[in-house]
Image (tube, grey):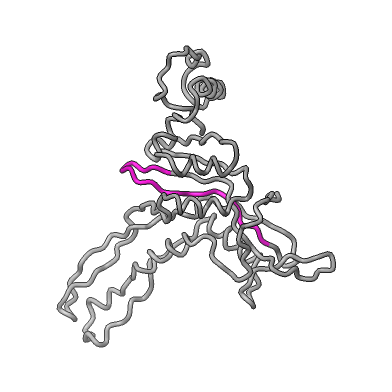
Amino acid sequence: MPIKVTNKQIKVHTDYVDFCPRWKLETAEYDKAKITSVDNHKSNKTKGDLAEPLTTWPRMPTTEELVYHQFIDSITDSKSNKFNPARDEDRRPIPKTGAMHVITDIIRLKTGDGLEFLLSKGSIIGHDAAGEEVNHHLPRPEMWVKTLFLWRNEYNSNTRGFDKICLGPSGTEIQYLKEFSKENAKELFDQRASDLINFIVKDQVSDEARMVEKNVNALKTFERFANNAFDFLWSGEYIPIQVRQELRQQAAARGDIKGNVSDYEFKGTQSASKAGPGVR
């Protein structure tokens, strides 16, 4: 489905760039997990004759990763390492066209230890070999999964020292590439597909996300999102109390939050510190 892009300031890339570095980062962790031959530790070879590590711990690419690379290959000229250009009705390349990353949602995530990071949802827009526009959904390129490995120290009689032996994966950790700051948020905002961009605050512990209500225009909404504290946005304190109650009622009717519509009737005396509407 075509992505409507009205932001004319988005950078268009003609030379190849990696729009999603997470896969290289995840692969690099496996590349560090060297598997050595048992013979290196039990043979009569001298230290200088020991073989190099045979390989790295095998890694199976995810379906998401395979689909991403397949798409990138389809919009890239492998010979020139440039993105395919759009073409006019006579099939001639249109100058200064290539590929771009557009963003439709910016997410401000608060972790359990109080740290804040930025994530995004959007699409890569490029052109196939015929110059036709194609796109690929790209969720959360600002995070990656670090694989942890279990190691054991084993005595090497040949070197009379200890070698670290990789025993395999032992767990994973989520890593975030973009800390929350107004400057980093502005960088993502400048990549918006249009002024219909959504701003979201998300609590990692509860896994609940809430939409930041739109202001008079996209820039004003961005300033609300970037300039205020997370808890202020989370509780919806910038929204008039009666409007907050109406939004809660709508959320209750949809089943997005617990309770009945009558539980959120406006009484005219509620405190402005109560939480705002939940959006899943």
Front-most of residues 242 and 89 = 242
Q: In the image, is residue 121 part of the stretch drawn in magenta?
A: yes
Choose top left, top right, bottom left or bottom right for residue 246. Answer: top right
Q: In the image, is residue 206 part of the stretch drawn in magenta?
A: no
How far across and how far down the image is residue 153, in percent? 20, 67
Front-most of residues 110 and 205 = 110
Front-most of residues 86 and 231 = 231
How far across and how far down the image is residue 109, in percent? 42, 44
**Is the residue 15 above or below the residue 217 in the image?**
below
Dominant SS of magenta comes to: strand
Front-most of residues 125 and 165 = 125
* Residue at horizontal 46 percent and vertical 27 percent from the top: 276
How far across and how far down the image is residue 28, in percent? 40, 66
Q: What segment is highlighted magenta in the picture?
A: 109-126
How far across and how far down the image is residue 168, in percent? 33, 61
Residue situated furthest right in the rendering: 90
**Is the residue 79 above or below the residue 104 in the image?**
below
User: From the viewer's perspective, is 107 left or right of 6?
Assistant: left
User: From the viewer's perspective, is 173 left or right of 190?
Assistant: left
**Is the residue 262 above or below the residue 66 in the image?**
above
Number of numbered discs overlaid on the protein picture: 0
User: From the viewer's perspective, is 39 left or right of 2?
Assistant: left
Choose top left, top right, bottom left or bottom right for residue 40. Answer: bottom left
* Residue at horizontal 40 percent and vertical 39 percent from the top: 229
